[in-house]
Image (tube, rainbow, N blue to C red):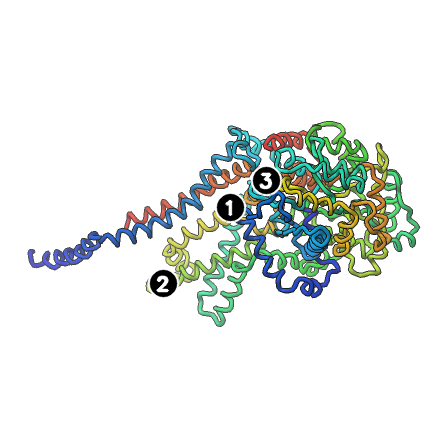
Amino acid sequence: MTMHEDALLRASSRGGWDRRTLLKTFGAGAVAMAGIPLLSACTGGSAPASGGAKTATFGSGSSDEVPKAAYKAVTDAFQKKSGIAVTTNVVAHNDFQNKINTYLQGSPDDSFTWFAGYRMQYYAGKGLLAPIDDVWEKVGGNYSDALKKASTGADGKMYLIPNYNYPWGFFYRKSLWTEKGYTVPTTFDELKALATKMKADGLIPIEFADKDGWPAMGTFDYLNMRLNGYQFHMDLTAHRESWDQKKVSDVFDTWKALLPFQNPNALGMTWQDSAKSLADKKSGMYLLGSFLTQQYTDKAIADDIDFFPFPEVAVEGQDAIEAPIDGLLLSKKGGQNQAARDFLAYVGTPEGQDVYASVDSSNIATAKGADTSKFTPLNKKLAEAISGAKNISQFFDRDALPAMANNVMIPALQSFIKDGNVDVKNLEAQAKSLYAAQ
Amino acid sequence: MSVSTNPSARGRKAAAAPARRVRRLSGRDKVVLGLMVGIPTLIQLVLVWIPTLMSVGLSFTRWNGLELTDIKPAGVENYQFIAQDYPPFWPAMQHNVLWLAFLALVATPLGLLLAVLLDQNIRGTRIYQSIFFAPVMLSLALIGIIWQLFYNRDSGLLNFLLGTAGTPQAVDWFGDSSVNIWAALFAATWRHAGYVMILYLAGLKGVDPTLREAAQIDGANAVQTFFQVVFPAMRPVNVIIIVITVIESLRAFDIVYVINRGTNGLELISALVIQNLVGEGQVIGIGSALAVILLVISLIPITFYLSRAFGKDKEA
């Protein structure tokens, strides 16, 4: 989902985009257009007949100002280059995600924004998406193996063209660390030693917020991948592995060693509260997605933020990284429209991604060769962390059945944070019922 | 004898005559009446009864929300799951009961008290009425902001007044699962009392002043007058208030939802229904089963109210 996505989009809409510039760019037309996608969403859309036509439709859930403008720039640049007109239907991102079922079964647009993970594979398995192996033949060279793996359906065919992603990891203030002489930990023991030191220095070692429920999934995912490996994470979230086993309880047992170092007030805090606490140097480090940095509008603080990947625990070193990928899919109907395939291919080129990033610079472009000259040192580091990873996970709420993430994991993690107890037998019982209903 | 019965017979005749005229409906009248009854019935059917019956039906199935052919019968499995495997369900039931008890014992009497005080023709009574009623009219988002300002752990008014803001002793009103339900109940009282107050104010205005005078002449003091004369005289309002209090406690939703979407100590049935039916965490079978459970519980006060209302019609 979506919950963290939601937070990200909200944050990015607050990012550096000047409202006036936007209005100048679009003029009043943007206002008039805003009503159209809503109407077409109601009637199920009246997209023009495809097939040979030199037009394509594009459904976008990126409804906030910055991403919306960025996609507009992409479709404009594509039209200039290829002569194919892409009509964009923007739907408010929450609605878009919540109504994806009806959207895909009605008359969806040829291409639409979505993300890698369980739900992409699920809809692909239901035959609602068109495979795009031919597009991947053209642009596949632009992507790393990890991205390729994340774009593949359960049937081995390709479905997603990644546009951008944002990694999860530890963020900290460089000046605080230099002052106190802290060094970046690469193993779990070093992390614990560092946290102990920070606690002695009167800091909250690991900033943590879980009032909204989803941020704690990041800690769970990383500990799971570092203890049991990337494949186990994928199998567990797809429920090919049982929750009622030692491997899972080991994750929680290991986490218990970290709990005393995490902010004890996490359950009453949002990630924005935690971001402030990190900025105020009340806490030493914070495990979150890179959207965290969008909170720091003060340049002095933003430039003082640094990143390190989650330390090694037991297996696979630091090979896997949690970096949710956003990109474009082709609906079943759109699969017959060559123009839509060309559009996806364009988004899969460094050129297309540069156009996007020129407007929305808060994320990391996925294609190799995309322009990194405008990156801040931190963004460069984030990009390297992703390109160096052998495996990319999508965050629990995208890799797992959304009902499992929302209805089961959130209460389970919150009660674990509260008293350190978790009932893996019950987790398995719930998982069984929910996955069976799909 | 005949003289004395005559006027009443004539009176009966006069009363019956217009009734007979109403029975003679023209074709146009029939169409109009048909439309007036038919359209609301149709709306009621489409918006209330059909969805209700469909929910009941779906609560015995498993469905992923895609093709209709994907609907699989599941018997009572969804109900079994809710009762046995779904951890938030029983806390939610308890919280709903607590909610009901709190509204009935604290919020409703408070509303009554406010109404009685404001009924005394004190100066500026309309201003007070508006102030107490304002929370009922506020939007969800605004309520969220107001209570955030009040309860926030580090910068909230409450911890500031307690002198604990910014210290480790500060009470985490939203995050601590042993206190957040009380914080939410306080916020709910703030709304509910205003609502009850307005209804009772109307009720008090409707009480015949001669009743009070009679009670005073009989030597009753103010408390006796209120509890033994005025309060029983407001019986129709009391029934409505009871039903409203029960229903408000069953559909309590907005306040917990703005705090943390009804998790971590704030589980309520209505919040669970929303979580399971709307949005990405959608599990249609389980969500429908939860909705049916809520419906069955709601039927109790509704039946109570309807039997009272119709029973009284028959009496009259």
Disc number placed over residue B296 in the picture, else none? none
Q: Residues within 10 Å of mark 1 (few under 14, many from 20)?
A: many
How far apart marks 2 and 1 lie (CA) works out to 36 Å
Q: Earlier in the sequence, mark 2 or mark 1?
A: 2
In the image, which is nearer the foreground, mark 2 or mark 1?
Answer: 1
Camera-nearest residue between A311 and B93: A311
Q: Position of residue B240 (x, y in %)?
A: 42, 52
Secondary structure under tag 2 reads helix
The residue at which mark 3 appears reads as B282
Proximity of marks 1 and 3: CB atoms separated by less than 8 Å: no
Q: Position of residue A310 (x, y in %)?
A: 83, 41
Proximity of marks 2 and 1: CB atoms separated by less than 8 Å: no
User: Is disc 3 in the same subunit as disc 2?
Assistant: yes
Dividing the picture into quadrants, the one containing residue B18 is: bottom left
Chain of the residue under the numbered disc 1 shown in the image? B
Q: Along the horizontal axis of the image, is A110 left or right of B312? A: right
> Which amino acid, by three-letter code, is at mark 1?
Leu
Secondary structure under tag 1 reads helix
Q: Position of residue A163 (x, y in %)?
A: 74, 46
Please determine whether, in this image, residue A349 is positioned above or below residue A303.
Answer: above
Q: Along the horizontal axis of the image, is A205 left or right of A360? A: right
Disc number placed over residue B250 in the picture, else none? 1
Q: Residues within 10 Å of mark 2 (few under 14, many from 20)?
A: some
Camera-nearest residue between B7 and B284: B284
> Which amino acid, by three-letter code, is at mark 3?
Gln
Q: Earlier in the sequence, mark 3 or mark 2?
A: 2
Chain of the residue under the numbered disc 2 shown in the image? B
Disc number placed over residue B212 in the picture, else none? 2
